Amino acid sequence: MNTISLTPSDLAIASSLLLFDAVLSVVLRLNLHRQLVWAGLRMVAQLVAVGFLLRWVFSMHHPALTVAVVVVMSLIAAREIAARPERKFKGWIGLWISGVGVAIATVVTVGLALTTAIRPQPWYDARYAIPLAGIVLGSVLNAGSLTLDTLLADARREKASIEAQLALGTPFRAAFAPLIRNSVRRGLLPIVNQMSAAGLITLPGIMTGQIIAGEDPIEAVKYQILLMFLLAGASGVAGLVIAGLASGHLTDGRQRLRLDRLR
Amino acid sequence: MPEPDAGQGGAPARLAARGLKSDLAGPFEMTLAAGACAAISGASGSGKSLFLRMIADLDPNQGEVRLDGVERSTFTPPEWRRRVPYVAAESGWWLDRAIDHFAPDKQAAARALAAALGLGDTQLEQPVLRLSTGEKQRLALIRGFVLEPRIILLDEPTGPLDPDSTALVEAHLKAMMTGGAAVLIVTHDPRQADRLGAAHYRMASRKLTRVTETVSA
């Protein structure tokens, strides 16, 4: 492969762009420079650590290790989804809801890819399973957090209209259905954007990576198409499961609107 | 006018609340006969709305509520709330036009009631966003009235209304009472309670007491 290897000084030069953003934040008083720099440092540390971790996991060839890595990644995604809304569920409910959504979406789509399209030998080959799960989890994180954030924010904003309907005898399910639709729809927008822009406005990351690494563009495109379908499916499943579970926890056996379950 | 406590001996009371409480308020006791009205006054935050919401089962609560002797838990929540509708002080809307908020079979009744309360087709067909607070309030009341309930819970129903509209709403409430419906109303206006021939209750620090010294007209 004719990959051009990057040196630390190459990366240092590129990091000046992040510093430019930070200076911009100070000058324009965006009050974002701390977060920008912190996020930048976090990104570097996380990626370097992951690089070494993956090198080790790839060399071990053990199914339990592969599964363990995917589970940890899923837990982190679930935690991020649960943390996103401005007013979160009290206690562990939020983490439980997002965890179930993440697990179902990831297992269904990654499982489908590993058993039909990609079929690595063995199936748990970390070189396939982990990057695949990572990409899917990125989409699940996007869709899940937008869905949950939208649903909880809408429920608070629409309290008067939801309770007006309940108070006249409308079942909770009927009064709440528009909110579920809107939140799932919001969760699906990023993947719709991603698919519409693919190839025209952006070259998707995986494809770009493969092409830079020397892969034939048509082979790279086929992989990318497969991935887009997986991401679309994962976004839909995550949004649906999370919206369904969250709406269930916003009501009770007497079909009340239980905003008191939010912090 | 029957005493609000009537119905102990013969027919069961239209509404009977016993030991109704939540973590926030209560326990409350109240009995309301068919055709009767009870008016609750008290400072903001004293628990008036909480009491109505507990009867409507919109907030978690314990205790017993009966409609014509039938315990609330025997109804599904939508069935209960259709029979015991609650109209909040702040009206809520979920569709574009006011008329869309009525089931197709209730729209004729809604138009008739709108006319009786000084509203026309214009207001019914307009986007809710363009209606005044007073117009929205009357339309929200009509949403409850078209259910033809045997009891209705009203939280400051005429708060944002001018005296003329208030008189029209009160006239309709009296007609409902003549027809046997009971009315439980939260109001800041003691004269409104008298005009409706209501039994007076006072809510203070989330406790409800019957006010006996005020004599109804």
Image: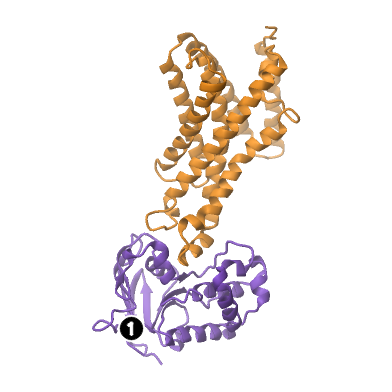
Chain colours: A orange, B purple
**Residue ID at (34%, 78%):** B14
Asked where in the image residue B51 lies, by quadrant, the reply is bottom left
Q: Quadrant of the C terminus of chain B?
A: bottom left
Residue B193 image offset from top left, x and y in percent: 44, 84
| Residue at mark 1: chain | B
Circle 1: residue type: Pro
**Residue ID at (58%, 41%):** A187
Residue A104 image offset from top left, x and y in percent: 47, 33
Q: Is residue A210 in view from this perspective?
A: yes
For disc 1, the marked residue is B4
Asked where in the image residue A138 lies, by quadrant, the reply is top right
Q: Secondary structure at mark 1?
A: loop
Residue A204 image offset from top left, x and y in percent: 68, 26
- In this image, A161 relative to A33: left or right? left
**Residue ID at (57%, 41%):** A146
Residue B103 image offset from top left, x and y in percent: 55, 68
**Residue in the foreground of this view, choosing between B194 and B94:** B94
B102 relative to A196, above or below = below
Residue furthest toward the bottom? B217
Q: Quadrant of the N terminus of chain B?
A: bottom left
**Residue in the foreground of this view, choosing between A25 and A69:** A69
